[in-house]
Image: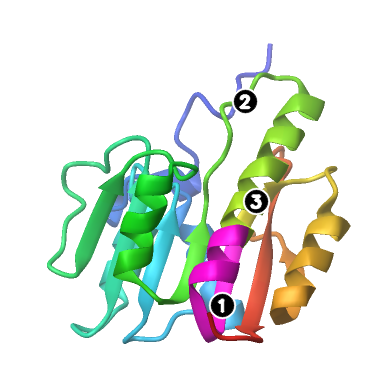
Amino acid sequence: MASNSYEKPDFWSQKAFSEGYPARSVYKLKEIDEKFHILKKSSTVLDLGAAPGSWTVFLLRNLSAEGKVVSCDLNPLSKDVKGDNLVFIQGDLTDNAVRESIKNEGPFDLVVCDAAPKTTGNRIVDTARSQGLVKMAIYYAQTMLKKGGCFAVKVFQNGDQQGLLKMMREIFVTAKGFKPVACRAESFETYLIGIDKKNDI
């Protein structure tokens, strides 16, 4: 019987651990940034669904002292994820108090979201839940990103990806899908990228 590739650390997982990142997902953000140049050294960045913290660590390592990362998740970040220019807000992203706390740390130059729903194994249910998370992330981008800001969000494929991109094209000059090489071959996740927000907040 073939072993499940999720059981053993693959190349990307081993590379992540050796470089001090909590998870392999960091290379997806690295690849997105290399292709779309969404991160500037002095950016104020909002990292939604941040735990365990790989994207937060990548952002902190690539920002200057003037930059700042605001990370939010229901779960705490890994204990070794820390920095003078890191603000962590633990809570539900749909909660008004959490939303206000995040808003008070902005406005932002970049919003990223690698959040995934708790999966059920039912692809239709999981895709629908993913769509809900993406719409919530788009709301944050729409209401908290500065003019000219950028956005990257994970989405499960086979949902209404074109509908989501249509929403994003109302907000950004450019919106497109992108699947990083670091995504597992069997994974049905991809990313939506928004470049150059049209209007200020």
Q: Are marks 1 and 3 in contact (CB under 8 Å)?
A: no
Left or right placement of residue 166 versus residue 13 in this view: right
- Image quadrant assignment for residue 133: top right
- The crowding category of the residue bearing disc 2, from other C-alpha atoms within 10 Å (few below 14, some 14 to 19, many at least 20), is few
Q: Position of residue 96 (x, y in %)?
A: 43, 46
- Can you identify the residue that label 3 sits on? 134
Residue 113, image x, y percentages: 52, 55
Tell me which residue sits at (21%, 52%) in the image: 81
Residue at (45%, 45%) from the top-left corner?
93
Boundaries of the magenta span: 139-152
Q: Give the vertical position of 94 relative to 84 (above or below).
A: above
Q: Where is mark 2, residue-wise?
A: 119
Residue 28 magenta-highlighted: no
**Residue 58 position by quadrant:** bottom left
Separation of residues labelled 2 and 3 (CA atoms): 15 Å
Question: Which amino acid lies under the numbered mark 2 shown in the image of this protein?
Answer: Thr
Q: Residue furthest left?
A: 84
Density class for disc 1 (Cα within 10 Å; few <14, some 14-19, many ≥20) is many
Front residue (pair 199, 130): 199
Q: Mark 1 highlights which residue?
A: 150
The answer to which of marks 2 and 1 sits earlier in the sequence is 2
Instruction: Give the residue drawn at x 50%, y 40%.
Output: 10
Query: From mark 1 to mark 3, how far is it between C-alphas?
Result: 15 Å
- Between 3 and 27, the one lying in front of the other is 27
Q: Relative to 112, does residue 134 appear above or below in the rendering?
A: above
